[in-house]
Image (cartoon, grey):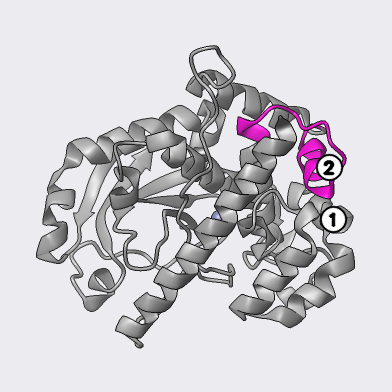
Amino acid sequence: MMQLLKRFRSLLIVLLSLLMFNSFTACEKDDDNVEPEKIVTPDVPKKEEDNTDQSEEEGNITLYSVNGREIKKLKDYQIADSLLQLQKDSKKHQEIWSLISQIIPENHTKFFNEYMIFAGEGDGTAGYVVQTKEDLTQWQIGIAIDFAYEGGFNRDGELSYTIIHEFGHVVTLNNTQVDSKIAEENSKNYFPGEGEARDNSYVNALFQNYWKDIYNEFQEIGDDESKNEAFYEKYQDRFVTQYASTNPAEDIAEVFTHFAIFDKPTNNTIADQKIQLLYNYPELVELRNTIRNSLRIGTKSKSAPIIKVWKRGATFGKKGQKRS
Ligand SMILES: [Zn+2]
């Protein structure tokens, strides 16, 4: 049964990536000048009155400040008329936030100080996180409101999946995990872009155990889409999803999501070993339990979110970019 489910899942993911690749290519054809990924320079204070083109090019709709469980509107961006309805609908902004708030445990709310509502249609990004402080103590989480309501709010748990994935980035890239003061040339551990992964960090453990032997090969691929595809095909048993093969930082966010929403795997593939690795950390097991209790995953009435049509941008997590 598990095997069958897995096969079904990988089939869906393959189908999804084919679809995504097509729409992504089409998007580029429409407008050759559009950058597929959003560039953000961390630590630059935001001028709220500043209505320059910076706000229009990115699909940003509304920015909120975050204080624990509370959000407060900071700015409505100048947007196309077609998106105005999504900007006015603050009930939806709040409904998405409530789900984020449900997923992020109390002791992790300190990492979030901004919440962005944006339109994902442009580049197919469903969500992202980006550090708002260079030392990685504070983060902005962005959610694509159009995707969040596609086919109904949080259809098949897709939005929950996105939020857990983005939360997984903050769990594995915050200041306790990554040292932003170390430059790449001085880094001896895995370097996710935000800084050097600390010796005992989760992502460094994942890297040392399951990436080191294929990392040179991986680095030679670069951004070439078909080479990335081939890399995934070759090492498929190492990855919980195709997106996980994007890089180690995306891998651990995907592994974290699977760790949170599915039962503990019993097989011995490398993909399963990666999930089992996270069970070695009591604080992560506690995090898992909190999320599952809050979403009532594993109870009779509530099954795990289904990985179905999760939309993602083609990002490779270079420094200063938002992490999708
Ligand atoms: Zn990601």
Asked whether disc 2 touches disc 1, contact meaning CB atoms under 8 Å apart, the reply is yes
Q: Which residues are magenta?
A: 259-279
Quadrant where ligand 1 appears: bottom right
Residue 186 in the image, given as x and y percentages of width and height: 79, 75
With 196 as the anchor, is 150 left or right in this view? left
Residue identified by numbered label 2 = 273
The label on residue 103 is: none
Residue, x 63% and y 32% (percent of image)?
260
What is the number of callouts on the image? 2
The label on residue 210 is: 1
> Which residue extends farthest left?
81
Secondary structure category for the residue under label 2: helix
With 184 as the anchor, is 111 left or right in this view? left
Q: Is residue 273 magenta?
A: yes
Secondary structure category for the residue under label 1: helix
Q: Which numbered disc flags the more N-terminal residue, 2 or 1?
A: 1
Q: Against 83, is 255 above or below?
A: above
Residue type (three-letter) at the residue carrying disc 2: Gln
Residue 164 in the image, given as x and y percentages of width and height: 53, 40
